[in-house]
Image: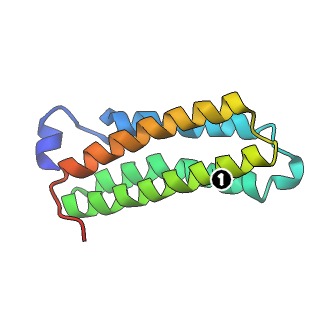
Amino acid sequence: MTSQKAGGIRTYRDLVLWQVAMDLAEQVYRITESFPATEKFGLTSQIRRSSVSVPSNVAEGFGRGRRLEFRRYLDMAKGSLFELQTQAELARRLGWLKRDALSTLRDLASRADALLAGLLRSTGVARQ
C-alpha cells in the first residue's frame, strides 16, 4: 500500500474503484426509490446495503494501511458486488427493475468488478 500512496493515491477517494462503486451505490438508491413500499425493509434495504458495502469496504481496507488487510476488504467488496448483482436480478424478475436500469447497474458493476480484479492483483498478496 505504501507504494500506491507514493504513486499519487493519497486517499481512498483517489481510487477509481471507489469512485465507480460510489456511482453504483448512488444509482441503486435512485432506482430503488420506485420499489414497492412493502419492500422498504426487505429487498430495497438489502440491495442498498450491499451497494453501500462496496465503496465502504474499499475505503475501510485502504484506511487499514496494510496490504493483507486491504486485500481482505477488497475481497469483501467483491462479495458485496456479487450480492448486489443477484439482488438486482431478483428485482428485475419481480418486475421492479426496468431493463434499462438493470443494464445501467450491470455496466457499473462490471466496471467495478474489473477494477477490483486489477487492484486485487496489484496487492501482491497470494490468495488462500
Residue 34, above or below 56: above
Question: Could you say where residue 112 lies in the image, as x and y percent from the top left?
Answer: 42, 40
Q: How is colour applied across the structure in the image?
A: rainbow
Q: Amino acid at mark 1?
A: Gln
Measured from the top left, where is residue 41 in percent x and y? 78, 58
**Residue 56 location (% of width, % of height):** 46, 50
Residue 71 visible in rendering: yes
When asked about the image quadrant of residue 49, the answer is bottom right
Residue at horizontal 32 percent and vertical 63 percent from the top: 72
The residue under the point 58% across, 49% down is: 85
The answer to whether residue 128 is above or below residue 54 is below
Q: Residue at x 19, y 52 (%)?
A: 123
Residue 13 pos. (x, y %): 36, 36
Residue at 66% of width from left, 48% of height from top?
89
* SS category of the residue bearing label 1: helix
Going by the image, does 42 lie left or right of 72? right
Relative side of 67 to 86, left or right: left
